Amino acid sequence: MIDQNILDNHNLTRGEFDLIVRLIGREPNLTELGVFSAMWSEHCSYKSSKFYLKQLPTKGSNVVQGPGENAGIIDIGDGQVIVFKIESHNHPSFIEPFQGAATGVGGILRDIFTMGARPIAILDSLRFGPLTSPKNRAIMDGVISGISSYGNSIGVPTVGGEVYFDDCYTLNPLVNVFCLGLADKDKIFYAKTGGAGNAVLYVGSKTGRDGIHGATMASAEFGKETEHKRPNVQVGDPFKEKLLLEACLEVMEHDLIVGIQDMGAAGLTCSTAEMPAKSGTGLEIDLDKVPQREEGMSPYEILLSESQERMLIVALPEKVKAVREVFAKWDLDAVEIGKVIDGGQMKVRFHGEIVVDVPVSAVVDLCPVYQRPVAPPSEPAPASRRVHPVPDDVGRVLLELLSSPTIADKEWVFRQYDHMVQTNTMLLPGADAAVLRIKDSKKALAVTLDGNSLTTQLDPRTGGRIAVAEACRNLACVGARPIGVTNCLNFGNPEKPEVMRQFKEVVEGLSEACRAFGIPVTGGNVSFYNDTEGASIHPTPVLGIVGLLKDIDKVVTPGFKSAGDTVVLLGENKEELSGSEYFKVHFKDESGPPPAIDLAREKAVQETCLAAAEAGLLRSAHDISEGGLAVCAAESGFFSDDGLGCELDLDDGIRVDALIFGETQSRILVTLKPSNVEELLHLAGLNGVKAQIVGKVGGDALRIRQKGRDVVTVPVKTAFEAWKEAIPRYFAIHL
Amino acid sequence: MKFGIVAFPGSNCDFDTFYAFHDVMNQPTVWLWHKDHSLKDVDCVVLPGGFSYGDYLRSGAIARFSPLMQEVLEFAAEGGLVLGICNGFQVLLELGLLPGAMLRNKHLKFLCQFVTIRLENAKTRFTHKGRTGQVLRIPIAHFDGNYFAPPETLEEIEANGQVVFRYTDAEGRLTERANVNGSLHGIAGLTNKNGNVMGMMPHPERAAETLLGSADGRVILESLMSRF
């Protein structure tokens, strides 16, 4: 008998249970309830978000596959496609940072190579509580070690990403992992079964008791007893995944299979239900044939285990032998566990008895979709009630900002990742976007992950727009045009109307911005229930945007190149201070409206930068974001080969701290040979963009003047040390 | 010269190494599968980087038992050229083709970065296109690259000129900071006594094109391609 207690343990409501009974025409047994509970979890079903996600633009002439498959696919010409996706692994990474993060990498890699693509890059967006707390340092160290152990071993470079720090992530770190793959357009594979009689093969690792109900766990708030959920976290084996990757790509190369799906969240259940649901067939499997690592596992456990490194493959009966030979070459088992059947049922046998017999459509497609209560739109954020005087020594504040962990150098993080394997990485991590050349072509791909949760907390809609704008701006800075978007939406408990309001407004903001830029969203991931002990995180949309460069010789990098180059500012400086890192770090003030954004102006600025890059005019380009113009100019010096400084003279009549630390949007700092300046100003004029000559590269100091008055003079070396040593110091390792 | 790139399960720089010899340097290059017993008449065997068998035990400790290693041992004994890069170097140590062992890096972290190494001996089959004292900029990517050997072994390999590369700063000076993984004597690469087997932790295949930040690795690739 299914009672309330059992329902609570499965995170199912009474209403959902009643619907299950109606759909299958009887009360489900416990195993069937487990199947529904996993597939109807927020993590797998998107039941709270689906309604809003529909508004995202998903069409485009280059879109081969939009949302709904393991990953999105975009055509990049010359018979090639890119396959990409982002996933969260937030909850497991809090409970067990190393394995939580490692299996996050493993899971997203499988999403990519399931579709026939070789993974060529990983990026991560990580958010932790402040490093002053030993617990937060331990989580960060564990997460980075986990990502590094998995990615390095399997040989996919981790080429970039972001690391942010805020109090709201103390009990709820965010680990969002993005993967990009490259495939031939005529070698894409989907999760389909073909007709009845086809063989169903289980390949990869054996099934154990790890990760049972991981998807359900990820769909609930955490309380104090969260540590007890450790057995719900899976354990990764990157070596096994490397073998699986090579074997899967080999059977695809030789056209030996009909369809394939990885066993990720909800494990065998998910692939056994989704593959036939997408193909209008049914599936019958025998659990006694599933390779098992432990003895005495129940059907419930086998079906819901989230053991890693496993795939389900469907092949024509006459190809089974050839498939098994390829897997044997890679020392992997490929075991026939069932077959495709007509009639749309998912039938599972165990010890000769049918233990699950439910319609696949009920499990996959008929989960209720919720329009949860949404709090009324909030008033525009009121201006900060506190008045902050301009600090006497803004040079000192600059050093404070450069050494704040969100802005400080992340080399301590990314040198633990193999970011060069596969020999395509043209820009080292830390640049505005990662750039990867495509072998045997003149093209390159640029990738960025971006999100700013403080902006989104203060004004979700504006924050959503800014997230897209900034990510595209990062691409423009390296000279790449955006071609496709994936997103990871990290929010609190959707049953709270305030959280749903944030979600609704962020999605609307994202949607508007993607339409303005004309870029399709090809999929993504929603992570709700990022609440621990009742407190929600800031709404944190993370945008993963891929760009294309037609000519690798036109890649632009952020570092200054040579003394005497002219510095030009594209865009306008405004007096916008609230919502900035400066206010947060220096005044501990996180109130007030965030900077405004005008998408048309943003596009014009980016278009100017892109046109200049494509014409070969630019020596460097760097986006002005956290820490404002001063941090941007300092970083351009740090990225130069020989610690170049610059002299800037600005004549805007606004507060000096707004001028140098403000985070007004739609600004890019570029440098170029003096002889190219006129052409750049002409391009800016054509696009209606304000472009002003603000100084020149040179010297060994960062000097900024406002209307001729010195406001900052800091030796590049001093600034560099503040920026470089901040994070290692927390981990007591001296470079 | 015909090159053979060995693929162990878990090798992950095998494609890169193949690409560097075959596509960048335009050399005849073939794959050597770890389960086979044939070296396909190659002139030089290259053991690439990666995580053979996951390196869950000691790095390279299982790969040395691969069937093909029997042929590699015989090939080396007859004077055949064998180059081990990163994990390949670790396998050569486990095979006993080179002396010493690798410990975890001194700060107990995986390290992926460009380093500068000084060429100590330009009179080897692997380095004769360079000059002694030359500083090369080549990336490393490893967890276990902290070279260790007992004092008498160190003395012997130094006396024989077997140390080919040392971690130095950009000016070629040995400093503690430049010795990123803590290797004894700053050793980044060495040969056997006969000079036909070399192991190195830095990845020359990642520094074969200026597009990727450095082409200094060509010193090794070009040395192997041309007559000594």
Image (cartoon, grey):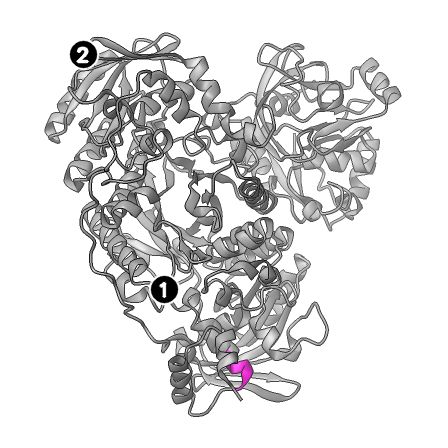
Q: Earlier in the sequence, mark 2 or mark 1?
A: 1
Chain at numbered mark 1: A
Q: Nearer the viewer, residue A476 or A528?
A: A528
Question: Image quadrant of residue B149?
Answer: top right
State whether residue A344 appears in this view: yes
Q: Compared to A57, does A442 lie above or below?
A: above
Lateral position of residue A81 relative to residue A603, left or right: right
Q: What stretch is highlighted in magenta?
A: A29-33
Disc 2 from disc 1: Cα separation? 55 Å
State whether residue A103 appears in this view: no
Chain at numbered mark 2: A
Q: Compared to A189, does A723 lie above or below?
A: above
Kind of element beneath mark 1: loop
Q: Compared to A295, does A732 lie above or below?
A: above
Kind of element beneath mark 2: loop
Q: Say which residue label 1 marks.
A: A68
**At 30% across and 9% down in the image, what residue appears?**
A564
**Mark number for residue A707?**
2
Q: In this view, which residue lies farthest toward the front?
A: A386
Label total for image: 2
Q: Does the magenta stretch include residue A78?
A: no
On-image quarter of the C terminus of chain A? top right
Which amino acid type is marked by label 2?
A: Lys
Question: Image quadrant of residue A599?
Answer: top left
* Residue A159 percent across, percent down from the top left: 47, 38
* Residue B223 percent across, percent down from the top left: 64, 21
Q: How crowded is mark 1: few (under 14 residues within 10 Å), some or many (20 or more)?
A: few
Q: Residues within 10 Å of mark 2 (few under 14, many from 20)?
A: few
**At 65% across and 67% down in the image, what residue appears?**
A208
Lateral position of residue B139 relative to residue A388, left or right: right
* Residue A61 percent across, percent down from the top left: 24, 53
Which amino acid type is marked by label 1?
A: Gly
